[in-house]
Image (tube, rainbow, N blue to C red):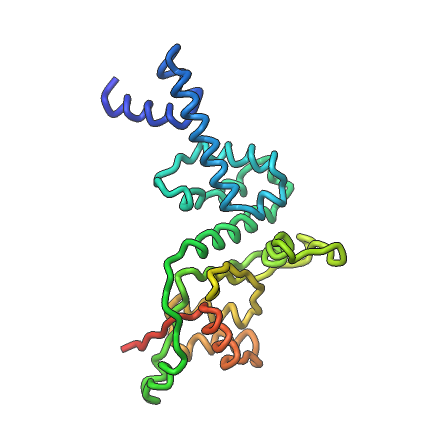
Amino acid sequence: MTLAELQARFIAATHDPVAAEALFGASAKGASAYANNTLFNRADALGEAYPVVQQLVGADFFGGMARAYARRHPSRSGDMNAYGAEFADFIAQFPPAAELPYLADCARLDWLCQRAYYAPDQPALKLDALASIPAERQASLGFRLADAVGQLVSPWPVASLWRAHQPLEHDAANAFPSPDQGGERALVWRDAHNKVQVRRLLPAEHAFLAACQLQLPLAEALERALDEDMDFDFGLSLQRWVADQVIVDFHLDT
């Protein structure tokens, strides 16, 4: 056995009790315990990152699904808050979850929330700065979204499902949304109070913000929004997005 092969088997043994027993034989007890702890730590990290998915399927189902993922996906970083980026794709191919076709997109929204929470802080945009742009340069103006911002277009009501599973968002008088009620566009961001927010976007709002993510100039972003809705109120939307720290900067194309 080469050194590289031995190293690969050792790494596998630290993540898999069966591999630990195969490598260490009678001395595998300690390695197996470490592998089990590592496995459950990764599963616990997934529970922290995907709270809505866990509520939708229950703790037992989620635990089994998380451990199945953890066996196939070792952590590549010491930061467990970054673990689980591929979980939604795993769920989409996980046979026991096949009867819940909306679950993978709910996971994608959970992960956008996880990314938003841990995104770096950025200074807020001051609207006064826009007033200093010369009129002849305004056609080349474009807006930058915060690093915490994410968008998801889904055939399922993911934003409504997410909100229904937040504390204080649901009561007995309001039924949980049906997964079959139609698709939604979801916006994720972290507000000025460092709280992650999710809300449904109208088609024109999504079109405008998607254009901003592509760093398109304002004229083209507006054109895309107005193609969706001629009544799109850019001024009101801009004020709200700046106040919410969705838009945090602007650029001028040369």
- Asked where in the image residue 168 lies, by quadrant, the reply is bottom right
Residue found farthest to the bottom = 135
> In the image, what residue occupies the spot 23% across and 22% down?
3
> In the image, what residue occupies the spot 56% across and 66% down?
201
253 vs 171: above or below: below
Residue found farthest to the front = 193
On-image quarter of the N terminus: top left
Q: Nearer the viewer, residue 78 or 19?
A: 78
Residue 166, position in %: x, y?
61, 54
53 vs 135: above or below: above
Residue found farthest to the right = 173
Residue 86, position in %: x, y?
45, 44
Residue found farthest to the top = 26
Q: Nearer the viewer, residue 190 or 90?
A: 190
On-image quarter of the C terminus: bottom left
> In the image, what residue occupies the spot 57% across and 81% down?
231
Q: Nearer the viewer, residue 44 or 66?
A: 44
Residue 180 visible at all: yes
Residue 14, position in %: x, y?
37, 26
Residue 151 visible at all: no
Q: Is residue 160 left or right of residue 107?
A: right
10 vs 226: above or below: above
Residue 176, position in %: x, y?
70, 54
Q: Is residue 144 left or right of residue 209?
A: left
> In the image, what residue occupies the spot 39% across and 19% down?
30
**Tag count:** 0
Q: Is residue 169 left or right of residue 187?
A: right
